[in-house]
Image (spheres, helix red, strand yellow):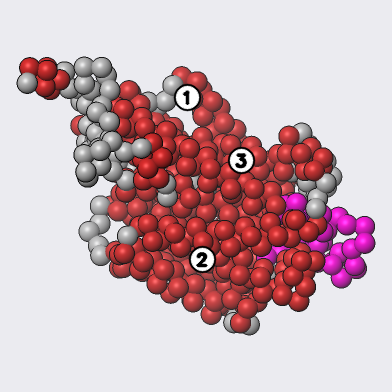
Amino acid sequence: MASLQQEQQLCEIAPTSRGNSKRIAALNLDGQSPPSIDDHGQQKPGWRKFLSYVGPGFLVSLAYLDPGNLETDLQAGANHGYELLWVILVGLIFALIIQSLAANLGVSTGRHLAELCKVEYPKYVKLCLWLLAELAVIAADIPEVIGTAFALNILFHIPVWAGVLMTGFSTLLLLGLQKYGIRKLELLISVLVFTMAACFFGELSYVKPPASGVLKGMFIPKLSGQGATGDAIALLGALVMPHNLFLHSALVLSRKVPNSVRGINDACRYFLIESGFALFVAFLINVSIVSVSGTVCLAKNLSPEDAARCDDLTLKGASFLLKNVLGKSSSIVYSIALLASGQSSTITGTYAGQYIMQGFLDLKMRKWLRNLLTRSVAILPSLIVSIIGGQSGASRLIIIASMILSFELPFALIPLLKFSSSNTKMGPHKNSIYIIVISWILGFMIIGINVYYLSTGFVGLADY
């Protein structure tokens, strides 16, 4: 009894978010929390504890597999072979760093990034950040919606504008699964991701790109040939998305984390491992897409018809890349992969919109109504452009959306780096000095690259 009283007296509360945190960190005599106990009073094995944290990383990784990434991968491979694979490697390493910071922020403070922005910043700054975050969700959603509409057009010859509408309704139906638990939705999305992966891994095993060329492209930075710099920036801009930072910091709150230093440290470690594995899968899929595109389009025996397609490779016309394995079925399987990519990433986009709206505005709305509002705002631009401009207008809209995302990134990245490096908010879980220096350097590098891409992109778009 005396020992218990002594432990209670030595409990400490880690200060976070200026008294607004929901997370309390307790320390016992040894500076460690009691081991995790299940419902039967037994200590959980490490693998069971890890599995209880699996899910958020895979949901977030879908942003790195959306139709926007698919299109930039296809074009990079067709134009430059394996030369730009190093950009994907660098981009996903940086993505792992900032996604782990977002997860740590949510776990340590008990609040997600949008909620912390609402508490930290004055009214007008907060309003601007909210509008920019909503714009980022819309911009990220455009390639996903249009990609899904293209897939429906290939499969069922549905007009693109009608496919845009169907995408909105189908996403709402799939999100209805969340009433049966987040795990069911995570399982469904995992199936969609691995469906897309299987399509390109199957083709990769057939075309057999040279291992030496792939490894050189992955580890030897090189920018040669016309348009290499622009394609590299487009690849990087499509990989790092601002709404993902809001999403990841919120998704980790769905897991039960012990209110102790050890419990929070364990959760941060498990989320890092899970995010690393999920992004590694995303990396392999992106590499396979670039490699398939590069191997097919740079082949010596390429037919004139396929050569013309490679010169202007788009989401709509890329199904011929799979014909070596699938023959006449290539368009069907490709459209299924594109459908899986677009539909799964639109689900995560809708989730991000929900958390952003709830965090910044603290709106008390039913989930289905909030989903409908988020979907309607995101789909409207795609619907208008697809009706007026058709398929060519929809493809150009994807380019514009990428430029918007490049502009948006600093307004999510800088608050994340600021909060995750704050002793006031993170307490003993704040970033180390090494992480602070590396993350800020990489952050400013990415921002500089995106600003350059934004400025040159508008010039290219004007000439388009």
Q: Is residue 190 above or below residue 49?
A: below
List the residue tagged with mark 3: 91
Left or right: 454 in relation to 369 = right
Q: How crowded is mark 1: few (under 14 residues within 10 Å), some or many (20 or more)?
A: some
Residues 106 and 408: in front is 106
Q: In this view, does 309 lie to the left or right of 181?
A: right
The magenta stretch spans which residues?
289-315
Q: Which of marks 3 and 2 is nearer the N terminus?
A: 3
Q: Position of residue 274 (x, y in %)?
A: 47, 42
Of the two numbered discs 3 and 1 on the same chain, state the one appearing first in sequence. Answer: 3
* Residue type at numbered disc 3: Gly
- Is 285 left or right of 131, judged from the image as shown? right
Q: Does 75 appear above or below 339? A: above
Q: What element carries label 2?
A: helix
Label drawn at residue 343: 2
In this view, 5 is above or below 288: above
Displayed quadrant of residue 177: bottom left
Gap in angstroms between the C-alphas marked 3 and 2: 23 Å
Tell me whether circle 3 and circle 2 mark residues in contact (CB < 8 Å).
no
Quadrant that contains the N terminus: top left
The residue located at (50%, 57%) in the rendering is 190
